[in-house]
Amino acid sequence: MLVSGVDGGATKTVAVVGRLDGTLLASAHAPSSNYHNIGVWKAAKAIRTSVNSACRHAHATGSNLETVVMGLAAMDSPMDFRSGQRVADLADLGKRRFVVHDSVIAIYAATLGRPGIVVNAGTGSFAAGIGVDGKTIRAGGWGNIIDDEGSAYHIGKLGIRAALRALDGTERKTAIARLLVRKFKLHALEDIVHEVHNRPMTVEEISSISKLVAQAAVKGDKAARSIFAYEGRALAKLVSTIARRLDMSKSKPDVYCTGGVFNAGPMLLNPFRRELRRNVPRFVLRHPRFEPVIGAFILALKEHDVKMQGVTLTNLESSYARRAVKMRSATND
C-alpha cells in the first residue's frame, strides 16, 4: 500500500511517494500549484504531474495510491479550502485526498507531531506551532499583497522601494539601485516601475530581487542591512505570537527555521534572536529534520494510524537520507 505527500507552493510543487512502513520510494517536482496565481486547473495539473512522476520513479501508478495529503499555499479561508479541495479532486489522485495549509506540513516535518514552533521565510512567510495537545495554529502568511513580512517577496519589494526612495532623496543612497539596473538592463532606475506594473513582474521575479538586497547587505550597504534587520524582527514577532497562544513563552520551546531567506545568516538571525528574546526569554533554534513535503507524507501515514517512531522513523530517516540532496534542490526557495 502506497501513500503520497505533496508540498504545493507558490514557486514549485514537490511530491513524494512511499510505503506505510515509512520508506520513501521516490520524489518529483513540478511548477507552482498556488491556485490564486495560476487557477485551479493549472494547480491540479502541477500536482498531478509531480505525483505521477514520483509514482513512475517508484514503478507504480497514481491508482496505486491509498491516501494523498496535500499541503497547499494560500489556504487562508473556508473559500480557499473549498477551492483547494476542488484542486485535489481535479488532480484525481489516490482513494482518499486531504488538503491542509502548508504551515501544517511544515510543522510536522520539523517536530514529527511533537510540541514546537516552525517559522518559514521563503517566497512567502508564516509561523506555525503544535501544542502539547496536538493542536496546530499559525500566524502570518496572509499573502504577498496583504502580508508576508519576512519573506523573499517582501524583501524584494522593500529593495525596490529603498532604491526609488533614494532616487527621491527621502532615504539614503543604496547599492540596490545599481544592482536593479544591471539585472533588468534598465536605461534608468525609474524604468523598474514599468517592469513591476506593466509587464508585470511575477511573485517569483520580485522574490528573486531579495538576492540583490542580500548582495548589497553583505557588502555593508546600510539600507539593505536595515531591510534584513526589519524582516528578522517581523519573523520573531510571528514566533512570539505562536509561543504566547500555545503557552510556550516560558517553557524554552524548540524553534525551527526554514526557507531560503534564513540563508542570509547573522544579518537576519541576530535581529531575529534579539526580538524573540523580548517575549520568549529561552528558546532553542533548530533546523527542521525534513523538508516540508515529508510533513505531508507523515500526515498521510497518520491517516493510517502509523506513528512516527521506532522502525517507521528509522525507515523514513534512512530512505530520506538517500534522497535528501535531490529533494533539497527541488524544494529550496
Image (tube, rainbow, N blue to C red):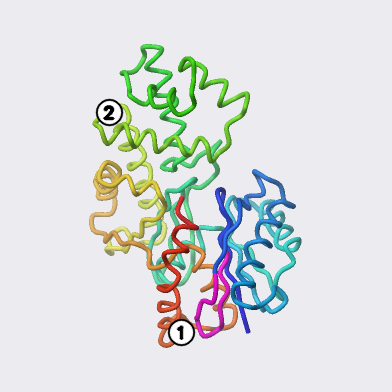
Label 1 neighbourhood size at 10 Å, few (<14), some (14-19), many (20+)? some
Q: Is residue 171 above or below residue 220?
A: above
Q: Which mark is residue 257?
A: none
- The kind of residue tagged 1 is Thr
Q: Which mark is residue 312?
A: 1
Looking at the picture, how far across and down is residue 140, in whole percent? 48, 47
Q: Foreground residue, 279 or 57?
A: 57
Query: Does the segment drawn in magenta span residue 305?
Result: no
Give the vertical position of 296 relative to 318 (above or below). above
Nearer-the-camera pick, 310 or 63: 63
151 versus 197 height, above or below? below
- Over which residues does the magenta segment extend? 15-26
Q: Residue at x 28, y 54 (%)?
A: 280
User: Outermost residue toward the top?
Assistant: 169
The answer to which image quadrant residue 116 occupies is bottom left
- Left or right of 198, for residue 118: left
Secondary structure at numbered mark 1: helix
Nearer the observer, 13 or 298:
13
Which residue carries the number 2 mark? 221
Residue at x 38%, y 68% (from the top left corner):
289
